[in-house]
Amino acid sequence: MQTVIIGSGNVAYHMAKAFTMKGIPLAQIFGRNEKELSTISKEINIPYSTETLKDADLYIICVSDNSVEEVSKIITKKDCLVAHTSGSLPKEALAGEYRKSSFYPLQTFSKSKELEYEKIPFFIETENEEDQKILFDLASQISENVMKSNHEKRKYIHLTAVFACNFVNHLFSRAKEISDSQNIPFHYFLPLIDETVGKIHEIEPKLAQTGPAVRNDIRVLQLHEQLLKDESLDIYKTMNHSIQKMYEL
C-alpha cells in the first residue's frame, strides 16, 4: 500500500519515523516547509516534496487542527483513504470525496525527544469495516495499543490529555519560573516530579494527593500566597480551591 504523510511538524516527523522503524514503507512526505522536510527526509531516508503530491492509497495528514480542512483539499484522488491525526476533529473535517478516517496517536510529540512507539495508544475511526481493518493492521505494526473510537469519545480522550499533559507541563514551566527567580536549580525538583508521575502507575491519582491543600494547612497556603503575584497567584488559588473541593475540605 502506497502511503504518504502530509506535514513537517512534530507529529509528521514521529509518524514517519515510527513507520520506517517498523519497516512500513512510505512513498513520500509532503508539505510546505522545505527546510524541515529536507531534514526529515535525510534522517529517515524517504523522498519529500513541497510541490507534487505523489499518488497513493493512503494519505495521513499530520498538521494543526486549524489547517486540516485546507490541507485536505489538495488531495483530489477519489479512490483513496485519507486520515487526520487530530484528537478533537471529526473525520468529516476532511474536505474531499475520498474515504475519510481518523488515526489519532495519544502522545505529546517533540522532534528532540525519542519515543517508544509501541506504547503509544492509537484511536481509529473509519467509514467502513474494510478501512477500519486497514488502519488497525497498520497501527498494530507500530503500537501494542490500538482501539476504535468515534469522534464523541475522542473529544473526551483529547480533553483528558490536555489536563494530564498540557496543563501539567504548564505548571512545570511556572514552577521553573519560581525556582529561577530564587536561583534554585530546577533539576533539584526532577526526582520529586519523577516520583509524582511514577506513583500514579500504582496508585489512583486521587489517593496519591499530598500537600498543604489536601491537609487544609491554612498557614502554609497563606504564606505561599504572600510569595506569589499575578498569574501564578491566580493558578495557586484555583488549584488549591479545586483540591479542597475534591476532598470536601
Image (spheres, rainbow, N blue to C red):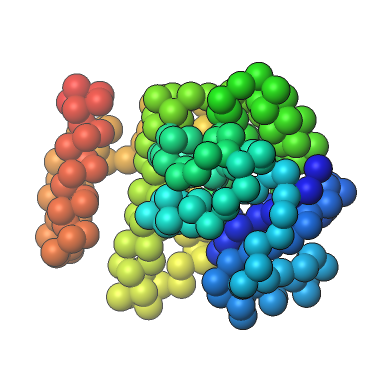
Residue in the picture at 42% in, 50% down = 69
Residue situated in front as seen by the camera: 79 or 84? 79
Indicate the quadrant where residue 89 lies.
top left
Determine whether, in the image, residue 178 is placed left or right of residue 234: right
Location of residue 11 with respect to 127 vertically, above or below: below
Residue situated in front as seen by the camera: 102 or 93? 93
Determine whether, in the image, residue 215 is placed left or right of residue 198: left
State whether residue 79 appears in this view: yes
* Quadrant in which the C terminus is drawn: top left
State whether residue 114 appears in this view: no
Residue in the picture at 25% in, 26% down = 246
Q: Residue furthest bottom?
A: 35
Q: Position of residue 10 (x, y in %)?
A: 57, 61
Q: Position of residue 120 (x, y in %)?
A: 65, 40
Location of residue 24 with respect to 63 vertically, above or below: above
Residue in the picture at 87% in, 49% down = 23
Residue situated in front as seen by the camera: 117 or 173? 117
* Quadrant in which the N terminus is drawn: top right
Indicate the quadrant where residue 48 lies.
bottom right
Q: Position of residue 138 (x, y in %)?
A: 75, 36
Q: Position of residue 29 (x, y in %)?
A: 69, 62
Residue situated in front as seen by the camera: 205 or 79? 79
Residue in the picture at 61% in, 80% down = 35
Q: Residue furthest top?
A: 129
Q: How many marks?
A: 0
Determine whether, in the image, residue 1 is placed left or right of residue 61: right
